[in-house]
Image: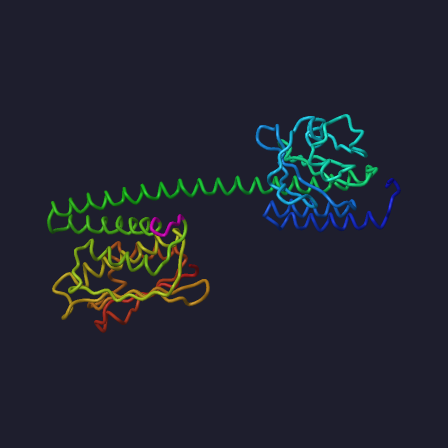
Amino acid sequence: MSDNSFDHERWIRRQSALAEFGRQALLVDDLDALLHEAVVLAAQGLGVGRAKVMERLPGGDRLLMRAAVGWQPGLEGVLVVDAGSRSSGGYTLATGTPVIADDIETETRFDVPQFLREHGIRSLINVIIQGRGDPFGVLEVDSDERRNFNQEDVDFLQSYANILAAAIERRSSNEALSRLAEERAVLLRELQHRVKNNLQIITSLLNMQIRRVGAGEVESQLRIIGSRVETLRVVHDSLFEAGSVERIGLPRYLRTLCESLLAFHGVRAEDVTLDFAADDADAGVDTTVPLGLLINEFIVNSLQHAFSGSGPEGGGRIALRLDRTAPDGARLTLSDDGPGFDRVKASRVGTGLQIMDVLAAQLGGRLAWDGEAWRKKEGARLVLDLPVL
C-alpha cells in the first residue's frame, strides 16, 4: 500500500492535531496522560490501529512499553524488550535516526520481538523522543497492513516526539525545582528551629540575671530586653508550630504573644487581665516581627507605668483588638485602663514610644494615640492602621 502522494487535507488535519497536542503539553502535568494522548493521536494521524511509547529504562539496555493503544491488555507498563539490535526501538536509539520498516518479514537490521508477530504487525515506523540529555525512548506506530511510510509520516511522528520531549523536559525541570524548594524549606525550618531554641536559651539566661540583680533600674532594663527577645521567640515558635517558613496565623500568634509577655513579666491573671479579639488573618515574618515588637513596647509601658503601683481598683486590663478593615488592610487597637499619659511629654523622656513610631513606619502603617484619654484618666489607647496583611 503506497502513501507517497501529498494529501493537502490530510496535512491540515495533522497540523491541527499537532497544534492541539502542543497546547495540551503546556497545560497537562500528568505525563502518563500526555503519553497516552500522544500514541492515540499518532495512530489516528497515520491511519493505523496501534502505537506505543517505549521508555528507555535506567542502564539503557531495556525498553518498557510506557504508553500504548491498540495492544492486548496487560502489556502497557509491563512489557520490556531489548534496547539493542534485537528490537526496532533499540535499533532506532542505536542509530540515532528514525527507522521505517515496510515489511518486518524481510527485515534484517534488527530482530522482530515475538509480541509484534503475535499482533500481526507488518509495517512500523519509529522516531526518537530525544530531549536535551539521554533519549527518553521512542515513539512507534505499527500497522497490521503493509505500509510504505514516507518522509511526511516521519516528520509528523517526529513532531509528536519533539513535543513529548519538551513536555518531559519541562516536567523534569519542575520536579527539580520542587525538590530544591523542598530542600530549602527543610533547611529554613531547621534554621528556624535552632533560632527558636537559641532565643529560648537567651530568655532563660536573662531571667536568671533578673533574679540575681533584684529590683531596680538594672532589673527594669533587663526585663525590657528580655521582653523583646521573648517576642522574637514567640514569632519563631509560631512559625515552627504552623509548619511554615513564611506565614503566621495572627489570632493565635497575637494571643500567645500577649500571654507570654505577661507571664515573662510575672503578671498574675488576677492583677492584669487580657481582653483579646482578632479577626482571622495571617501575615509574613516581615510584618509579624515588627508588629510583635510594637505590641511588646505597649505592654511593657502599661506594666511599668499604668500598673506599676497597686494598679487600678479591682485590677488592671490590657486590651488588644485586630479588625480586618479591607481585603488588604487591618486596624490594631491597643489600650489599657490605667491613668493614661501625655503622649507629647512622654516621648521626650522615654525611648519606648519612639521605638513604636519606628516600628509603625517599618510596617508601612499609620499610628495614632488617643490624646484625650489621658486627660480623662481613661487609660492609654493607640490605633495602628496596617495597609497590608
- The magenta stretch spans residue 196: no
Say which of 328 and 95 sits in front: 95
Residue 349 location (% of width, % of height): 23, 56
x 19%, y 43%: residue = 205
The N terminus, quarter of image: top right
Q: Is residue 299 above or below residue 53?
A: below
Residue 119 location (% of width, % of height): 72, 40
x 40%, y 48%: residue = 245
The C terminus, quarter of image: bottom left
Residue 145 location (% of width, % of height): 81, 41
Magenta stretch: give its range.
Answer: 240-245
Task: Determine whether, in the image, residue 1 is placed left or right of residue 339.
Answer: right
Task: Determine whether, in the image, residue 323 is placed left or right of residue 227.
Answer: right
Tell me which corner region of the image, top left, top right, bottom left or bottom right, holds residue 297: bottom left
Say which of 180 and 369 sits in front: 180
Residue 232 location (% of width, % of height): 30, 49
